[in-house]
């Protein structure tokens, strides 16, 4: 018997893109369940809170039926299922702690502390320039870090690169010009060219098109409901 295909709870435009990239990178097939994050509902009408009490994605249903949440934990779990992969070898070595360092920075400082205020409707307009300034400072730092390397840690792609790509790509959603940071721009293009990333992004684009079609067909009062980042 083959390995059980786990359910992966995902959203379009979300940070959960990183998990999909990692799974494809190491050849673990996942059954994607696209979540309506505006209403916190699964396609069958199940409340997302029944899957994850935090009401967030990503979440992964493990073979024993339990649910694992938080992108860092899920990505590390997936890598541990492929102990002979390049991603696993990096995670086992001395560079493991550098990868964890980057994962913490990306998740807290760049994602939550940087981009999330731009997504939230409750963010005061006066704070948006502050958030943009914060993001610019972090992108500048990334650009300097990439001055003499192709990846964030060592000489190979890691889960930190998948995570970084999934967050920095939000610059496109907020019309943030990355040309002032040419090394970062080249890094993003290099990561985007990987087959795993192309496939994960294509799946997301297909889902976005389906969601747009559904919104167009919805009653007028519901047409402003759009996907948002978690």
Image (cartoon, helix red, strand yellow):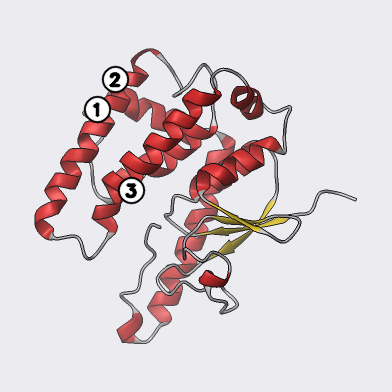
Quarter of image, res 195 = top right
Q: Secondary structure at mark 2?
A: helix
Residue for badge 1: 140
Badge 2: how crowded within 10 Å, few (<14), some, or many (20+)?
Answer: some
Judged by depth in the image, the label closer to the viewer, 2 or 3, is: 3
- Residue for point 48% across, 33% down: 160
14 vs 173, nearest the viewer: 14
- Residue for point 52% across, 70% down: 49
Report x, y in % for residue 217: 42, 81
Tell me the CA gap for discs 3 and 1: 18 Å
Mark drawn on residue 144: 2
- Residue for point 25% across, 50% down: 174
Q: Secondary structure at mark 3?
A: helix
Residue for badge 3: 112
Query: Quick one: label 3 or label 1, which is nearer the N terminus?
Result: 3
Quarter of image, res 81 = top right
Left or right: residue 3 compared with residue 224 = right
Left or right: residue 91 compared with residue 64 = left
Report x, y in % for residue 165: 43, 38
- Residue for point 53% across, 40% down: 197
Could you tell me if the residues under marks 2 and 1 are in contact, i.e. CB atoms within 8 Å? Answer: yes
Judged by depth in the image, the label closer to the viewer, 3 or 1, is: 3
């Amino acid at each position: 018997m083959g390995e059980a295909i786990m359910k992966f709870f995902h959203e379009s435009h979300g940070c959960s893109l990183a998990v999909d990239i990692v799974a494809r990178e190491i050849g673990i097939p996942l059954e994607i369940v696209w979540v309506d994050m505006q209403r916190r509902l699964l396609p069958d009408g199940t409340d997302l809170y029944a899957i994850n009490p935090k009401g967030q994605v990503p979440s992964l249903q493990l073979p024993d039926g339990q649910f694992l949440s938080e992108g860092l934990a899920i990505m590390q779990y997936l890598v541990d299922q492929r102990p002979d992969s390049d991603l696993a070898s990096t995670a086992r070595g001395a560079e493991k702690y550098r990868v964890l360092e980057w994962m913490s920075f990306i998740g807290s400082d760049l994602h939550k502390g940087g981009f999330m205020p731009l997504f939230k409707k409750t963010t005061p307009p006066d704070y948006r320039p502050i958030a943009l300034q914060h993001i610019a400072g972090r992108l500048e730092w990334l650009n300097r870090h990439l001055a003499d390397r192709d990846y964030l840690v060592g000489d190979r792609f890691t889960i930190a690169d998948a995570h970084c790509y999934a967050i920095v790509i939000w610059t496109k959603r907020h019309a943030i010009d990355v040309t002032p940071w040419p090394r970062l721009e080249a890094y993003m293009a290099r990561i985007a060219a990987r087959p795993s990333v192309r496939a994960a992004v294509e799946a997301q684009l297909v889902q976005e098109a389906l969601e747009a079609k559904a919104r167009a067909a919805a009653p007028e009062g519901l047409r402003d409901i759009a996907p948002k980042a978690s």
